[in-house]
Amino acid sequence: MGTRSCQHICDESSPAIGEAGKTGEWRDSFPVIDQKKCIPARQNKPTCFLCWLYCPDGVISKTMPVGIDLEYCKGCGICARVCPADAITMVNEEEFRPD
Amino acid sequence: MKRSFVLIRTNQVSLINKKTDSKADIQILDGNNAAAHGAKLSRIQVIAAYPITPQTPLTETLSEFVEGGELTAEYIAVEGEHSALAVCASASMVGARTFTGTSSHGLAYMHEMLHWTAGARLPVVLACVNRAIGAPWNILNDQQDSISQRDTGWIQIYARNNQEILDSVIQAYKIAETVYVPVMVCYDGYILSHTEMPVDVPSQEDVDRFLPSYKPHTILDPANPKNYNLVTLANPRVNAEGTLCHGYMELRYLLQEAIRNSRETIARVGQEFGEQFGRSYSSMLWEDRLDDADIVIVAMGSLAMEALVAADMLREEGHKVGVLGLRVFRPFPKGDLVKALRKSRLILVFDKNISYGLEGATCSEIKSALYGTHVNAVIRNFIVGLGGRDVKARELADAVNKSLWLVKEGALTSDYPEWICHI
């Protein structure tokens, strides 16, 4: 069978980042934060973080400034929807490449 | 009729089996009660079931055991059968011995979780009280419900009487927890579930000696987080820890192999049961007078008991008739079957199910088992007893006689099954 290094009889693994592959590859648009509008950046204090709270993939960091891990962001756009300052824009992956 | 029943005047009789030294406690139990006693004696820890006719008294009895303090178990009331099996599967994954029971539409509603439980290799035991499936509504017996779940990856055992129900439930745990495949113990609704018979109820000490405690293959434990049964693609993959893990197809192969190889475990557990309790289940089949029989009646469940009476009648009429009862339907006992049928010239398969557009399921499987072997018998299929239609021993005997006459006349066709009904 060629996979004898795995002794499991049902699918089993330890939770780890990247266990399901680089899910960022699934995306067709990515979020860009405008730090001039983002509330924590503007007020220079750890506040708001609604994007971090609502991100279903846990790829947004509760940091100063707010960061997004584009390796695993699937591009759902929830962060852009919930941002009260309209600081997040979804950009088409085909037209622009995230740096 | 030659077969006689043991007459028991009181409700409980204590006997000592001299051979095995185990105490026998004969109780008058219906099939549901026998299953409940079997589950209780197996020290089940979690029960989740939803009542459905004719399984209802089984859930009632179990909840009484729990309420009355006779059984230390969590009885989890659920809103339907899908949830019942989801609870059992989850509880099994955290290391509990679990039990559920259902019938007909309830089993159909469980379908998705039946696949899930087998795929996750969880040794859940389920009592299926065989009942017809609608439309039209029918609450009476046939085996269409469990036969419809044939390909879900469960071991299926069919009981012929109430003693076998109790014994099979206890054995089911030992089998399931050895091969990590869930087991369905099937018994005919009403014919067994609501009919009282003397049942030898083993003592708890004897069952404890027979059945070790459940050791899960993996345990879902918050202290040691694990992912189970996530999206698994077709091909093997290297996981985050660098181990080459099975793909979906390898896991399916392992399940098939586990069920195929469970034959040895089923026979061994059945033999051990015999050594402990004096009732041996070392064969996947029930064979009756097959040594000299050239005509063999094949049936499953309580019908295999009725067939014994039909065989008595036919023997009196001078025919060499034997009976083959299928005790285990999955894994299908291919090799044993070929051996048991080696002398047969005419095989009559009575099915309480129909695979629409072809024939009864057990008939198809017997034909497939005999393919490429030296057994070259005429095989005839009868569809009987659907939706609780009474099957009398005389009807079985008449069907055999008619088939013999057709063979003699050279007019036998076996293209389609024959229905014993009024059309």
Image (cartoon, coloured by chain):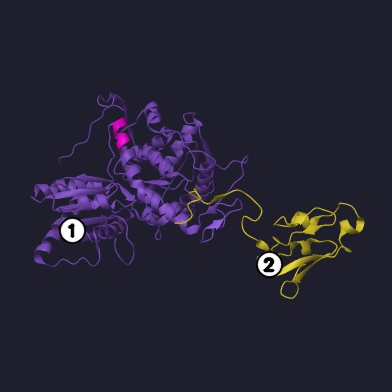
Chain colours: A yellow, B purple
Residue at the bottom extreme of this rendering: A95
Residue type at the position of mark 1: His
Q: Residues within 10 Å of mark 2 (few under 14, many from 20)?
A: some
The chain ID associated with circle 1 is B
Identify which residue is drawn at 13% across, 53% down: B294
Residue corresponding to mark 2: A27
Q: How many numbered markers are drawn?
A: 2
Q: Are discs 1 and 2 both within one chain?
A: no
> As rendered, which of B301 and A75 lies closer to the eye?
A75
Q: Secondary structure beneath disc 1?
A: loop
Residue type at the position of mark 2: Arg
Identify which residue is drawn at 40% across, 46% down: B183
Looking at the rendering, in which quadrant would you find the C terminus of chain B?
Answer: bottom left
> As rendered, which of B318 and A61 lies closer to the eye?
A61
Q: Is residue B273 magenta?
A: yes
The percent position of residue B175, horizontal first and vertical second, equals 38, 41
Identify which residue is drawn at 18% across, 67% down: B413
Task: Mark yes or no: residue B356 visible.
Answer: yes
Above or below B335: residue B6:
above
Residue corresponding to mark 1: B374
Q: Is residue B200 magenta?
A: no
The percent position of residue B247, horizontal first and vertical second, equals 51, 57
Q: Residues within 10 Å of mark 1 (few under 14, many from 20)?
A: few
Q: Which residues are magenta?
A: B271-277
Above or below B189: residue A80:
below
Predominant SS along the magenta part: helix
Task: Mark yes or no: residue B189 visible.
Answer: no
> As rendered, which of A21 and B122 lies closer to the eye?
A21
